Amino acid sequence: MDLFDTIKKDHEEFKKLFKKLAEKQTRGDYSRLHRDIVAHMTAEERTLYPALQETEARQLALEAVEEHNAAKHELQQIDQLSFDDEHWLPKFMVMRDLVLHHIEMEESKVFQHSKKLFDEKKLSTLQKEFSAARKETLAPAGKK
């Protein structure tokens, strides 16, 4: 699996969880989504985006990081609410829309630029680093 397949696989899982949570909010599904999105964003911020910032796609990478920051802010706000709070679902939907926009931008512009700017060896290295960073972020405390 290459870097883009790995990232897209995560995106597809997020979309499934978004749909599920929009229909019925459960603590387990939200916790899983939160954990996985944070791990995914952290891995991108440690690997792909720094590499892109060293290229002509710097502004695109900076924009992607800012989108991550906006999504993290919304996640923090959602975390403060209980599922029965009338604001939970609207806040969740805003966060979902931010992430879906980011996914669309990433799968088109970021992937396109990355394929042009990086050779297979660099993409392979980034994929390994992305997977390791994601795994490290997902590891329970004390298990890293």
Image (cartoon, grey):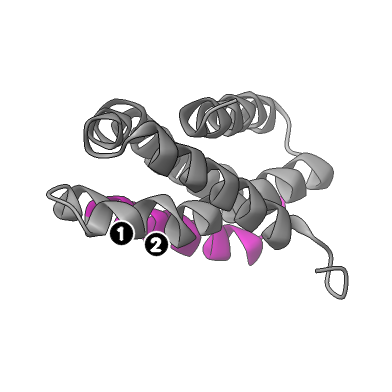
Report whether residue 85 is seen.
Answer: no
- Name the residue rendered at 80%, 60% in the picture: 139
* Contact check, label 2 and label 1, Cβ < 8 Å: yes
Residue 69: give x, y in percent of width and height. Answer: 39, 62
Q: Check if residue 123 falls in the magenta segment.
A: no
Quarter placement of the N terminus: top right
Which quadrant of the figure contains the C terminus?
Answer: bottom right
Amino acid type, residue under disc 1 in the picture: Glu
Mark 2 lies on a secondary structure that is helix
12 left or right of 120? right
Which residue, as the protein is rendered here, is positioned at the far left? 56
At label 2, counting other C-alpha atoms closer than 10 Å, the crowd grade (few under 14, some 14-19, many 20 or more) is few
What segment carries the magenta color?
63-85
Return the residue at label 2: 69
Say which of 13 and 144 sits in front.
Answer: 144
Give the residue at x 71% y 61%: 136
Q: Check disc 1 and report the residue beneath it.
A: 66
Q: Amino acid at mark 2?
A: Asn
At which x and y percent is residue 57? 17, 47
Which residue of the protein is positioned furthest toward the bottom in this rendering? 142
* Rendering coords of residue 46 (x, y %): 47, 61
Residue at x 75%, y 45% (from the top left corner): 32
Cα separation between marks 2 and 1: 5 Å
